[in-house]
Amino acid sequence: MAVAYKKEEILSSSRVARSFGQVLADLSGKRRRRVVVVKNNHLEAVLLPIEDYETMAEALAILEHLEIYRFVQGRKGKKRRKTISLDALLKEQRLTV
């Protein structure tokens, strides 16, 4: 997935290293929404305020739960096959543990 970044959001890794305290202050003070770190002309990292990261992590967890829910709901309507014990499966496949 490609994300568009504004020019003012992009900083070189050396500049971030030299002024790390200021970068953090800008992020926590809401003067910057995010900082994109570039090294050797490649995007390497994105620095975010902790609140934004936590919001994204919560959203991802909700999406994962929805995916699991949809998977379970899809299986509910299907006809169940006969179950087989692990020992029987191992014996059938000629496997040992």
Image (cartoon, helix red, strand yellow):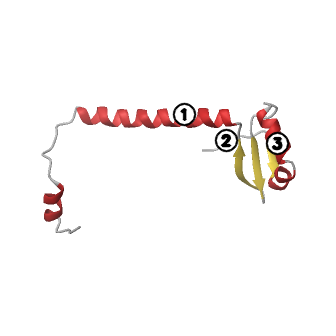
Amino acid type, mark 3: Val
- Reading the image, the residue beneath label 2 is 3
- Reading the image, the residue beneath label 3 is 23
The vertical placement of 95 against 55, above or below, is below
- Reading the image, the residue beneath label 1 is 58
Choose mark 1 or mark 2, whichever is in front: 1
Amino acid type, mark 1: Glu
Q: Residue at x 79, y 45 (%)?
A: 10
Q: CA distance from mark 1 to mark 3?
A: 25 Å
The vertical placement of 52 against 84, above or below, is above
User: Seen in the image, is 20 located left or right of residue 76?
Assistant: right
For the C terminus, which image quadrant? bottom left
For the N terminus, which image quadrant? top right
Q: Residue at x 75, y 34 (%)?
A: 33
Q: Residue at x 78, y 60 (%)?
A: 40
Q: Residue at x 24, y 33 (%)?
A: 76
Q: CA distance from mark 1 to mark 2?
A: 20 Å
